[in-house]
Image (tube, grey):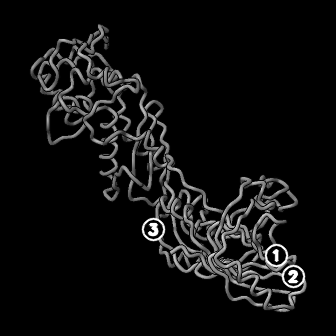
Amino acid sequence: MAEDEPKAVEPELDEEDEWQLYASAGYASTGFILDEGATAEDENSDEPWFDGDDFDFGGNTVNWDAPPCPAPLGIAHVIKIGICDYCLHRIGGRRSEERGAEAGAVLRHEAYARDEELQSKTTQDLCPLCENLFEDIGNIVERVFDSLSGTDFSTIQFGIHLPKDLIQEEDRIRSRYGAPASYPLKSALVEAIHHRIRSSNEEVDFVKERPDIMVLVDGLTLRVDVDVRPIFLYGRYRKLVRDLPQTRWPCRACRGRADDCESCNGTGLQYPDSVQDLIGEPIREALGADDTSFHGMGREDIDVRCLGSGRPFVLEVKRPSKRNHPLDDLICRVNENASGRVEIDSFCWCDRSKIHEVKGSRSEKTYTIRFRADDLADEEMVTNAISSLSGVVIDQETPKRVSHRRAAKTRKRKVVSVDSILIEGNEAQFSLRCEAGTYIKELVHSDEGRTKPSVQSAIDRECEVLWLDVEEIHAD
């Protein structure tokens, strides 16, 4: 039996962490957004950052000598260059009971009262700091909820991608004229989206880690990409029959393409059923998901049963529309769907890290194997020969049957114990406990001498494996 050896898990940036690169850096953050090429030397330089360039906004040139907000002259100057009410509030440095555009309108009204000619000097239609993006908050939120229609969620994370030149220009003006600790554009936009969503759905929480929903907004095109995060279930399965693969097995003839393939009747599968689908399909349907992925603690051969308490696995449910479902009902659905073939006793919710734990396990396993050989009349000799393998460290070269997908090397594995030896005519049966990654069938028939020692070499008779069962996986 070919027990797949769990491979060492190397730390890597999973898709959830990778997505964070696009998310807003610190909600309500007061830090400035720096160019990716900026260095510590650039930041600490004594040279003034102004390089002599002027910006012209509808005939009004930025006056670099004007004071920053909240000074009245500073507020008047940013109004003069065409800043919108949203941005006037976020860089104006004035606390008020109002929010967003309403608070900015108050500042603008006060400035007009101080200078009656100020309003006539404002000619800019497009805000130089945000390009009127705040006016599209309602449109963005509407697109998000349209995309999430019929989807259950309680936590959400937003990220927004803005053109680099817009960020640089906004930072340049805000850092000179904005009040101390004024909000950067990206953080302010995300906060405005949060406020709009809270006003329509008070039950949503905004988080930075493990959200149910992740949303990325393109500030240039207003495209909204919604990613419904997968959910994970941990359990153990018992495989009660032979000739059933653990995961989907693509058709050899069409290689899974399924188009008019007579070999697989258009299914794209070499075998119509698998442990993955017998468990995953009823759960996918119950949760309204797109698909499932199956992550097992190793795997048994297609002709091997897995008994005892079962093999640990994690089922990844992709893009579920329902996230909270009674686990007892899911267990019943699986056992009814896979009646007499696969069964499970329990489920629990888990996170992605459980996959690495399951895949990285090096648990010992107990097997029962039956084989046939000529001339087993001397039962005492055969029994002693098989028993002699208990506690032995064997050398196993990569078996021929898996050499196309496994590296060619010699593995050392320990046979922890051997017991329950039974001789019946030309057939023998025994149980053994071994280290993870031991090829059990090869331990019996030696794989043309690639496994040393073996049962075949111990009894000096050619052995033919009849069947193999996994009796227990000692994972807990």
Comparing labels 2 and 1, the label whose residue is closer to the camera = 1
Q: In the image, what residue occupies the spot 81% across and 73% down? A: 445
In the figure, is residue 365 to the left or right of 427?
Answer: left
Circle 2 sits on which residue?
373
Q: Residue furthest right?
A: 374
Q: How many marks?
A: 3
The residue lying toward the viewer, choosing from 73 and 427, is: 427
The residue tagged with tag 2: helix, strand or loop?
A: strand
Whichever of labels 2 and 3 marks the residue nearer the N terminus, that label is 3
Q: Examine the image and state in which quarter residue 155 appears.
A: bottom left
Q: In the image, what residue occupies the spot 29% across and 20% down? A: 172
Comparing labels 3 and 1, the label whose residue is closer to the camera = 1
Circle 1 sits on which residue?
456
x and y percentages locating residue 406 in the rendered image:
72, 55
Circle 3 sits on which residue?
324
The residue tagged with tag 3: helix, strand or loop?
A: loop
- For the residue marked with disc 3, what is the amino acid? Asn
Whichever of labels 3 and 1 marks the residue nearer the N terminus, that label is 3
